[in-house]
Image (spheres, grey):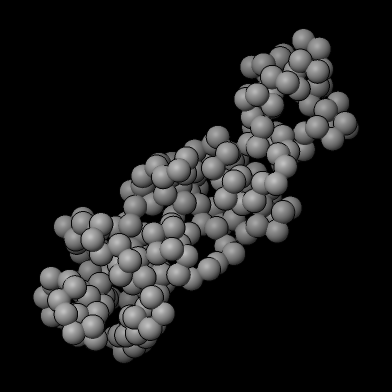
Amino acid sequence: MYLKQFSSALREKWKGSLFTVSEAKQVEARAKEYLYRLRKLGEVERVYWGWYYIPKKQQDVWDFLANDKRFKVLIKQTAASVWNYDFIHRNVYRLAVEDASYKRALEKFGKDRGWIFEVEDHDRIPYEYKEVDRLFIETPESCLVNCIADWSFLDAFAVLYFRKDDISFDKVKELARWKRISKTDTRVWNAIKYGCNLFNRQLERKMFDVKTTRLEQDDVRELVEEAVKRVIEFA
């Protein structure tokens, strides 16, 4: 296969996406040699050991995440920003993948562009997720629970507020009941119920049908109260 044909075949399949030398060899056995030549011509970019990228014009971070063909899930605060309409804008993108090599390639690719990718590598993604606009995103219920567990209370309660009609509280309870806020004995479900009761009381209407509860740990209670207050103030 001639170099031009090889380049066209790669672009058709991988433009705007990361890909490996092994995948390129499925197009042409001499892929390693051809990739070297295309790199010299500026038609491909070497990202990391064994990983390449075919540049695409005017591609921001969200375009890249949607166009990149590898399996990844947007999680925790990044997922929350989708569900709560970017209530807290962050320049850090949290992802989960099932390939350690891909994790390293993503982090290097992002760093070269000033994008901060914090990538978790798992044998199997431990988060519930769904597909939205070509992206796999942790579900509102799952990211609500995991943000609370990570002390990201404002992200979590903004999701709860904006998605109150979409969230399954049975699912939240299932995911949160035995999970604890990191480095505490406080159960995530108790923190969520406490926050729900704060919304009910401060808005003077029953938004959430949950039992009254208490939070014994002072710092957790104060931060949950502050998060709910800010959501109500700025939503």
Residue at the image point whose x is 34% and y is 80% from the top: 232
Image position of 86 with respect to 51: above or below:
below
Image quadrant holding the C terminus, namely bottom left
Residue at the image point whose x is 67% and y is 16% from the top: 27
Q: Can residue 220 be seen?
A: no
Please indicate whether residue 108 sits to the left or right of residue 203 in the image.
right
Q: Can residue 184 be seen?
A: yes
Residue sticking out furthest to the top: 1
Please indicate whether residue 94 sits to the left or right of residue 184 in the image.
right
Q: Position of residue 225 (x, y in %)?
A: 32, 85
Residue in the foreground of this view, choosing between 92 and 125: 92
Q: Position of residue 63 (x, y in %)?
A: 59, 46
Please indicate whether residue 137 sits to the left or right of residue 68 in the image.
left
Q: Position of residue 201 (x, y in %)?
A: 19, 85
- Count how many numbered circles sit on residues in the image: 0
Residue in the foreground of this view, choosing between 144 and 186: 144
Residue at the image point whose x is 73% and y is 21% from the top: 8
Image quadrant holding the N terminus, namely top right
Kindly indicate the quadrant of the structure image that contains residue 204.
bottom left
Residue at the image point whose x is 19% and y is 61% from the top: 169
Kindly indicate the quadrant of the structure image that contains residue 13.
top right
Kindly indicate the quadrant of the structure image that contains residue 44.
top right
